[in-house]
Image (cartoon, rainbow, N blue to C red):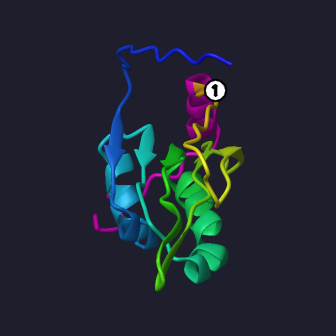
Amino acid sequence: MAHNLIQCQILVQKAVAAGAKLRFPEISLALRRQGAQMITYPSAFTVPTGQAHWEILLRARAIETQSYIMAAAQAGQHNNKRSSYGHSMIVNPWGEVVAKLGSEYEEPEIAVADIDFKLLEKIRMEMPLLRRTDIYAEV
């Protein structure tokens, strides 16, 4: 099967946070307040922490920011002491996993998902979740 790489300009507010930042919701919420519609988390979780926390944290960040989450994850055995969990995924603003890769890559893989900004806007309109900075201080 032939694959063609297509490059195009994306008119979207996007933000990048390093993997460990995934554990701190304040960072993703600050990005959301700045207009992020899509947040990416490149990461290298170990197998034990990945199994326990990876998907849960990604889905939580998507729900609380009402943003698409793109999570590229290092996978596989790197040496005798280090294995990365993998499971790269894309999560929609409702918290649904819309694309997910595995943990053992023999060859590179690509996750593909439709990004529906009408869904994002609908969710944000019907369930406004941004912190009320007129009542609570900004973090």
At label 1, counting other C-alpha atoms closer than 10 Å, the crowd grade (few under 14, some 14-19, many 20 or more) is: few
Q: At label 1, which amino acid type do we have?
A: Asp
- Residue drawn at (55%, 26%), measured in percent from left and top? 117
Q: Secondary structure at mark 1?
A: loop
Question: Which quadrant of the structure image shows residue 122?
Answer: top right
Near-viewer residue (90 or 6): 6
Count of numbered circles in the view: 1
Q: Is residue 9 left or right of residue 68?
A: left
Residue 32 at x, y percent in the picture: 39, 48
Range of magenta residues: 117-139
Which residue is the site of mark 1?
114
- Residue drawn at (64%, 64%), measured in percent from left and top? 55
Question: Which quadrant of the structure image shows residue 108?
Answer: top right
Q: Quadrant of the C terminus?
A: bottom left
Q: Quadrant of the N terminus?
A: top right
Near-viewer residue (35 or 13): 13
| Residue 136 lies within the magenta run | yes
Q: Is residue 63 left or right of residue 27?
A: right
Residue 91 at x, y percent in the picture: 62, 47
104 in relation to 46, above or below: above
Q: Is residue 46 left or right of residue 137?
A: right
- Residue drawn at (62%, 58%), measured in percent from left and top? 87
69 in relation to 131, above or below: above
Residue 110 at x, y percent in the picture: 57, 37
| Residue 15 lies within the magenta run | no
Residue 43 at x, y percent in the picture: 43, 62
Judge whether residue 129 can be spotted in this image. Answer: yes
74 in relation to 14, above or below: below
